Image (tube, rainbow, N blue to C red):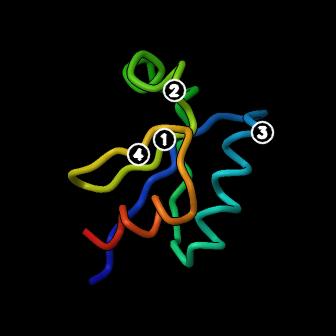
Amino acid sequence: MNVTVNLYTRDGCGLCQHALAMAAEAGVDVTPVDISGSVDLLERYGHSIPVLSTEDQELFWPFSVDDIRSLVAT
């Protein structure tokens, strides 16, 4: 099964870079989504990034490599 995983982020977010590295360690490809250009995304995720999401689930920081694997396994 191929699951699309978005990483909600913005420039200068060190935790987001860490989350990206964790996703790579988990073997999960993510699509970075910069929330800076969207009022809606800033309101939703502005104080929560990094956030990983699939079509039906969201994983808010803090999370582990195992949490990322579980996100795509369900």
Query: In screen coordinates, is 25 left or right of 74?
Result: right
Name the residue nearer the viewer: 5 or 15: 15
Task: Identify the residue at image location x=73%, y=35%.
Answer: 13
Residue 36's x, y, as percent? 58, 26
The reply to whether dot 2 and dot 4 touch (C-beta < 8 Å) is no
The reply to whether dot 2 and dot 1 touch (C-beta < 8 Å) is yes
Q: Earlier in the sequence, mark 1 or mark 3?
A: 3
Q: Residues within 10 Å of mark 4 (few under 14, many from 20)?
A: some
Instruction: State which quarter of the image contains the C terminus.
Output: bottom left
Three-letter code for the amino acid on which mark 3 is drawn: Gly
Q: Which residue is mark 2?
A: 48
Q: Which residue is mark 3?
A: 14
Q: Residues within 10 Å of mark 1 (few under 14, many from 20)?
A: many
Q: Which residue is mark 1?
A: 51
Three-letter code for the amino acid on which mark 2 is drawn: Ser
Q: Which residue is mark 4?
A: 59
The reply to whether dot 4 and dot 1 touch (C-beta < 8 Å) is yes
